[in-house]
Image: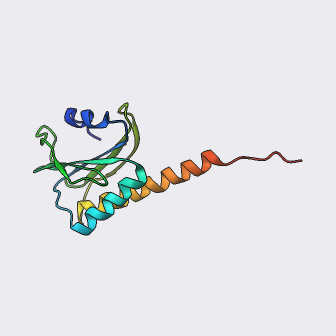
Amino acid sequence: MSPVPPILSKLVRAGRPLVLARVGHWNPTDAEELTLRAQLRGLGARLAVHACDCAVLLDPDDPPLRLEVQPALAPLDGIEVRIVDAELYTEWQSNEPTCTCSPAALLIAALREAVARKAHASLLSRLTYWPRA
């Protein structure tokens, strides 16, 4: 997994998790964008996508914001996804080296997995184990 680009590290300090995605190209359909926004709500996060031709910040409820493209990153055929917290610690990551479908579809699947893991961890932290009598 590549290091966090400096411009994105500024975005992470807004106090909530940031999903970093690096893809070869980025052109999600309207339906994919709506699904991505729903998954971001589930994570309480925003999404920063870096592709060869564009960089975009997506909040669950705000219009997409174009960011400066970081040309130093090598081109990618697949997708890299990382969720970082406010201190830039990686909470979760996924990597698909090749992409035969839409990068947005792969990102949606990765975010669904991250949301499920977050829900499972939250449930486990709330369980109370009763001692046997």
Q: Is residue 84 above or below residue 95?
A: above
Q: Residue 3, can we see it?
A: no
Q: How is the image coloured?
A: rainbow
Q: Position of residue 24 (x, y in %)?
A: 17, 54
Q: Position of residue 113 (x, y in %)?
A: 43, 57
Picture quadrant of residue 111:
bottom left
At 63% from the left and 47% from the top, the residue drawn is 126
Q: Residue 62, can we see it?
A: yes
Q: Is residue 106 above or below residue 10?
A: below
Picture quadrant of residue 109:
bottom left
Q: Position of residue 32 (x, y in %)?
A: 27, 65
Q: In front here: 54 or 40?
A: 40
Q: In front here: 37 or 7?
A: 37
| Quadrant of the frame with the N terminus | top left
At 16% from the left and 50% from the top, the residue drawn is 51
Q: How many marks?
A: 0
Q: Position of residue 4 (x, y in %)?
A: 26, 36
Q: Residue furthest bottom?
A: 31
Asked if residue 24 lies left or right of residue 86, the reply is: left
At 49% from the left and 52% from the top, the residue drawn is 117
Q: Residue furthest right?
A: 133
